[in-house]
Image (tube, rainbow, N blue to C red):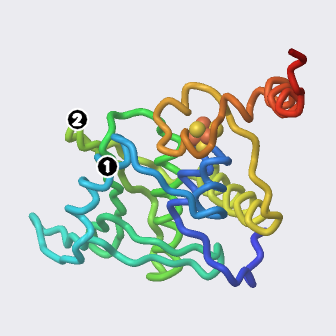
Amino acid sequence: MLDDKADDPIMISALEHWSYCPRQCALIHLEQTFDENLYTLRGNALHARVDEPTSEEIEGVRVERAVPLWSKRLGLVGKADVVEFHGDTPYPVEYKHGPRREHEHDDLQVCAQAMCLEEMIGKAVPRGAIFHHSSRRRREVIFDESLRHGVEEAVLAIRKMLAERVLPPPVNDKRCDQCSLKESCLPSVIGEQGRAKRLVRDLFVVPVP
Ligand code: SF4
């Protein structure tokens, strides 16, 4: 069960960060570290287009952009890129600049948006979608029990990390190649504990001439 008395709301985007790499989540949401790389710049450029709050009707579907979201129960705040209303039923759509990959991270984020909408509007939100800009295609996401459970587990884990203020260890794998925080994180140095210890020890060794 989630603590409904959680005071400090967590950004919905933290769930995607946590799912990708817990250390990345901690660096951003605990230490406020943020660096840009090609991937984040592309993402920013894409989101700039959907960051303007607008409302229009397209072929009978009301389309709201940049919709503020929150959940008191989960202790989450954030924003949906797009929420379509198919009749009375909200349908969140999250925009991603990259190709169709890393499903689980994106799915967690859009499911959290749906759970916020359900609490705010009082309507069931059974599905939504990820729009992949590079392929210009949508992938529908079903918000089943397992995904909703994953959101709740991630919220608890993030809240614990924020309360304990401890940086998780680096994953130090191929995820680091695309991570904008690589320079701040130093995953290969920190990840290799033995090497790091040797480096520290050697700092204090004075070479004998
Ligand atoms: S560089 Fe690697 S370990 Fe460090 S935050 Fe990024 S993904 Fe995580």
The numbered disc on residue 41 is 1
Element marked by disc 1: helix
Question: Which quadrant would residue 207 be assigned to in this image?
Answer: top right
Above or below 168: residue 92: below
Q: Which residue type does callout 2 highlight?
A: Ser
> In the image as oriented, which residue stretches furthest toward the left?
59
Is residue 166 or residue 161 the one in the foreground?
166
x and y percentages locating residue 181 in the rendered image: 53, 45
Q: Is residue 52 left or right of residue 176?
A: left
Q: Please tell me which residue is depicted at 51% across the width and 78% down the height of the picture.
A: 70
Q: Which residue type does callout 1 highlight?
A: Leu
Q: Residues within 10 Å of mark 1 (few under 14, many from 20)?
A: some
The numbered disc on residue 135 is 2
> Quadrant holding ligand 1?
top right
Q: Please tell me which residue is depicted at 77% across the width and 76% down the height of the picture.
A: 3
Above or below 19: residue 203: above
Is residue 59 or residue 2 the one in the foreground?
2
Q: Please tell me which residue is depicted at 65% across the width and 52% down the height of the picture.
A: 150
